Amino acid sequence: MAIIEEISEFLQKGRAKNVKTLVQQALDEGVDPKAILNDGLLAGMMVIGGKFKRNEVFVPEVLVAARAMNAGIAILEPKLVEIGNKPVGKAVIGTVKGDLHDIGKNLVVMMMKGAGMEIYDLGVDVEPDVFIEKAEEVGADIIGMSALLTTTMPNMKTVIDRMNEKGVRDKYIVMVGGAPVNQTFADEIGADYYTPDAATAAEMAKKAVLEKNA
Amino acid sequence: MDQEQVIKLTDLPVRTDRADVLRMMELKEDSPVYEEVLEEYEDVKEELEAMCAPAVLIRFGTIPESGERAAFVLLTVGGKLGEYSTQQFETGDCLKGMIADSAADSMLFHLEEPMMEALRQECALRKVGISRRMEAPVDMPMARQKLIFEKTHAEQELGMGISTGYMFRPVKSQGIIFLLTEDPDVFRVQHDCSKCPRLDCPLRKKPAVHMTVRDREHTGEIDLEPGQSILEALAGTDQYFEAICGGNGHCGKCRVRVAEGKLAVTPEDQKVFSTSELADGWRLSCRAYPETDLIIELPQRNTETYEAVTQFEGDTAVLRESSSLPGLYGIAADIGTTTIAMQLIDLKTGSAAASASRINHQRRYGADVISRIQASCDGKGDELRKSIREDLRAGMEELLRKAKVSWEDISCAAIAGNTTMIHLLMGYDCSGLGVYPFTPVNLDLIESSLNLLVSDTFPCIPAAILPGISTYVGGDIVSGIVCCGIDQGEKISMLVDLGTNGEMAAGNRERILTASTAAGPAFEGGNIQWGTGSIPGAISRVALNSGEISVETIADAPPSGICGTGVVETVSELVRNEIVDETGLLDEDYFDDGFPLARTEDGQQIVFTQQDVREIQLAKASVRAGIETLLLRWGITEEDVDTLYIAGGFGFQLDVEKAAFIGMLPPALAGKAKAAGNTSLGGAVKYLLDSSARERMEKLARTTEEMNLSGDADFNRIYMEQMMFAEE
């Protein structure tokens, strides 16, 4: 459908106004809100995420596109609620105890939303048990942790250890990221996935949830 | 000094720099969203600046553990900007959130200006200078932020907090410790971009100081980044130094003379240079951080004349079916950390038609493998790879030129090298080599071709890279074992390479044990104040009889330093003449200034210092302990050893009796020691000539047992015992 493709195109260019108008227009024309979301907004965001991963665009382009996406979603939201649209999956995300960095985590949240995930952002300096309690409460699929310091990185392991103690480790997909984190570290602490950037994290989250629920 | 009050500045100008913000966000001018982002920034700029609550805390005091005097500094822009950014992200306006975050960083950076002004005044009042700026986690551990937090009373003064991970709250704050010095003229307060690991930081500073560099033949021009030392600046040029101590201010190898301009005297300079040398402008380039333009002169050096040893043990009879080879010649190469040695081998006769040797130009990134690994991890991997490929290319062309043969006559090549050198040549990620558990990317035999490995201008000639055993015991040792035929003998023989890693092997056709002993670079002249490589002018022979010193230098050139053999001979003579006692203590007459050996052409005294003796004690003890531990594991004594092959250029010239005299080799092995030359090159030649060599090497790589000596009780015991010099 042409209007949906247009929405995706405008979103990629970061034209929030055009996206808003077109989403409204599509709704008025009776286009399926799910199609507008998935094939228009989220599809456009995927394209930008891919370009970001390949260094074809930088952070500002992604930010502008995300803003356009959010503008579109704001219009769409009531309709989606009405028809009971389900997110791809749910993720609880935060920066670990002791660490106050939030930009990286915010970018991951943004990209995961762009992949159709429902996100519970716990903020920074998050106590280990808070990750688990929130995940239990909302029935999350993923627990995502960020750490930017070698001094706070070990707190990722604390969360995983706590999950094991409580016997809930297998219920969740654990994803980790942040400048000092790497695959080796992720393997050592028993995380499921490490991703080097926000766009890859979003892709991985979606893939992992689909596999889990398959 | 801890009676000092906290100096608190709050009435500070707030400044954002548009260029900073855009750079930090990585917004390029050709971005399709450039205008849009810019507009957004202009819209919120004033609002953001109004949210800024700038404050600077400064307090003079001491660092508890070391007692060093320091100024503790904390800068903050307050908490509102961060909260605003988070809030914007939450409501979906990620762009505004990011702009707020970047603007907060920019405001924080601009607090440096008033902070430094205040710091300068306070230092002047106390008649002190600043020798170093330290930031966590680059220059000091994160936990140091807690000290800053407490020293500056940040909680009482500004209501700040600190997280369990030692991050300040609010986040847009920065802690700095400035180390003080007695010299009020020194004021080294700049953030050192060159030390920061964030190579992709959009704010990395552009060159600011201009330096003219002269030596006998040429003059060069270099721009220095603020906070970059002269040594670091020279590392990227042809006029580099071998920073053997890694730029830590004690090896004294990187001396330069300031011809014009001003350069502060550092404590390290005072240790290394005499008063008259300082007055003449001599400085250590690793400690030199020029703040104004200057002209420096490099001491006369001769690195290009480094000769690698190309002789080696063993015969090179042709064992391959010569009819199976289309060409007439093969190329063998050994990539050493210091030098590269190559031979063009006549495949019909097995003799060398030409030899070539070159300095490994990667030396500009550091003398030992550790500094190369570090450089590679610092994003210089491509430069290092280019450097070694260029050395191989030039060396191979030299071989062909010398022997007057063309590429059509070349049918194969074999390259041996330690694991790090091979990683750098292959362009592998070196990060695993430098940290526990020291994991290499690949150790296998690599069959490739010269056009891929060396230069795309070369024809596609099959080339092999010989396999290695571990990160520490590489293809050069595998090659050496085959060269000496250790893996074929019935009796047990040993191979010892006296390089920095001190690799060794002991075995026979049944079983081979290897180990590396981290002997350090002392036998190659490293960590020795006047130490140098085997270059013309290096003191290589020393005799001391009834107080009369006489030295011989390589090529009889005027003395310029002491090479590895000279170092061993010096220690041997000093011990024999009881100028160094059995504990390694230098006679008190020489304790302060070192024992004089000779004078350089320009009149500087070449000495052997107490510290140099200590370095040799460590190095020789670790070699000795390695040898004895290997024998213990084999369950044999020195008597059972057939031959001790000493590999390497240094080993080739070594006086075995003197090495045994200082305790580096067990006395019973001295008579069985054989200078085996460049066994790594020898093994590569064997690979070309002997069709069984490949299988032997692959078997060695697979089955050789590597012993970890660092935790070995026997090794540690012998190491301690052998630290002393034996009484006669």
Image (spheres, rainbow, N blue to C red):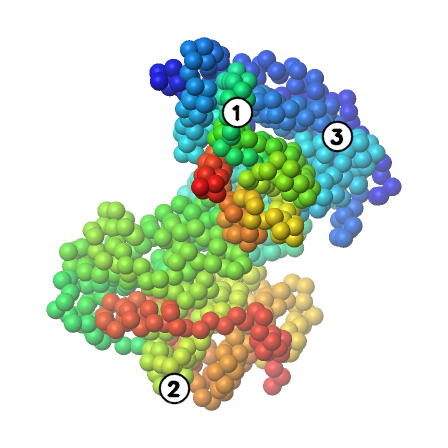
Please tell me the numbered disc located at residue B56: 3
Identify residue for label 2. B491
Q: Is residue B27 left or right of residue B181?
A: left
Q: Chain of mark 3?
A: B
* In front of the other: B551 or B60: B60
Percent across and percent down for residue B106 are 62, 26
* In front of the other: B406 or B218: B406
Q: Chain of mark 2?
A: B
Lower sequence index among marks 2 and 3: 3
The number of numbered badges drawn on the structure is 3
On screen, B299 above or below B469? Answer: above
Q: Chain of mark 1?
A: A
SS at mark 2 in the image:
loop
Identify residue for label 1. A84
SS at mark 3 in the image:
strand
Identified by mark 2, the residue type is Lys
On screen, B260 above or below B76? Answer: below
Q: Mark yes or no: residue B536 visible.
A: no
Q: Mark yes or no: residue B321 visible.
A: yes
Mark 2 neighbour class, 10 Å CA radius: few under 14, some 14 to 19, many 20 or more: some
